[in-house]
Image (tube, rainbow, N blue to C red):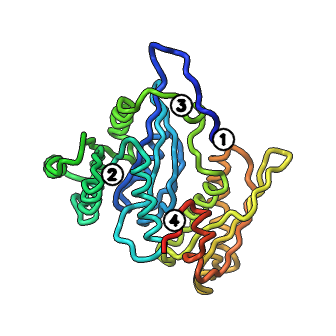
Amino acid sequence: MADSQEPHVGSANDNPEKCGFVAIIGAPNAGKSTLLNELVGAKVAIVTHKVQTTRTRITGIGMHENTQLVFIDTPGIFEPKRRLDRAMVNAAWKGSEDAETTVLVVDAKKGLTPEVERIIDGLKAAGRNAVLALNKIDSIKRDTLLALAQSMNEKDVFTDIFMISALSGDGVSDLKGYLSDLAPVGPWMYPEDQISDTTMRLLAAEITREKVYLRLHEELPYAITVETEAWEDKPDGSVRIEQVIHVQRDTQKGIVIGKGGSMLKTLGQMAREDMTENFDRKVHLFLHVRVTEKWADDKTMFQDMGLEYVD
């Protein structure tokens, strides 16, 4: 993943380059990150069954013929209780404001929940329309799905409705083609082979955080974060990464480390394998666990996650 460069200039006048910005919003666990990864064709966002795991606005870049689509995967929109919650929800709405097109992802099995109603009200209040993606359609009966689509259509906020399964990819190509048609003519903002503008350090931290959630979702609350403290490119092409898993209590530290360090070793192996595949280079990963009681109130942590510190 290269850093952002000067816009790519097209040459074919009969098939001009197009570039569109698309925000993906929705309630927690609606499948936004899974959809982002499917639209990009590579893993750029962490995916777990635990809600509210996307904390930052992760940008993925996908190509469709002559069109470059810049996707903004936002944190789930929910009723915020903590400072971190407020920052995440603000980031989600900011992502929608910054994009030309907004896709609202709704878990079809859950249907029109109070959270979804709140998001629709927010779109209306802002005077914005959205494309509706009814996700997880393979887990719902057709009659129920059609009834849901009809009730959503009556909300008068959606320009079009797509029925998809982000997990299997069913219907995603049609959605991508539609978004490509909406994109305005203009130069590409990133090189053709770039899939994200998320920094390597942040993506590495997100990968490790995903592994912690996958293995310890029952034992740990949301009160953990991962920080990439050091990144060293080695002469042989490999990279040495040092990360700290921040927890809020000593008991949580023991859970992450495990008996004789077994859990930390497992987490490190899982994260290292994922990073090696994503970064296409050998990774030397060193994990440490630190008790940082009030990390969720630390302005520096918010900056590292790309979030605005909200009072």
Q: In the rendered image of this protein, does residue 284 appear above or below residue 86?
A: above
Location of mark 4 (residue): 214
Location of mark 3 (residue): 188
SS at mark 2 in the image: strand
- In depth, the one of 244 and 273 nearer the eye is 244
Q: In the rendered image of this protein, does residue 243 appear above or below residue 275?
A: below
Return the mark for residue 93: none
Q: Residues within 10 Å of mark 1 (few under 14, many from 20)?
A: some
Give amino acid for label 4.
Leu
Give amino acid for label 3.
Trp
- Distance from label 3 to label 1 (Cα)? 15 Å
Give amino acid for label 1.
Ala
Check whether the beta carbons of the residues at disc 2 and disc 1 lie within 8 A of each other.
no
Q: In the rendered image of this protein, does residue 61 appear above or below residue 126?
A: above
In the rendered structure, the answer to whether residue 263 lies left or right of residue 95 reads right
In the rendered structure, the answer to whether residue 253 lies left or right of residue 53 reads right
**Residue mark closest to the camera, 4 vs 3:** 3
Q: Is residue 138 visible?
A: no
**First-in-chain label (2 vs 4):** 2
- In depth, the one of 128 and 176 nearer the eye is 128
**Residue mark closest to the camera, 2 vs 3:** 3
- Distance from label 2 to label 1 (Cα)? 29 Å
Check whether the beta carbons of the residues at disc 4 and disc 3 lie within 8 A of each other.
no
Q: In the rendered image of this protein, does residue 210 appear above or below residue 167?
A: below
Picture coordinates of residue 281, whole percent (x, y): 72, 45
SS at mark 4 in the image: helix
Residue visible at 75% across and 61% down in the picture: 230
Location of mark 2 (residue): 105
Q: Residues within 10 Å of mark 4 (few under 14, many from 20)?
A: some
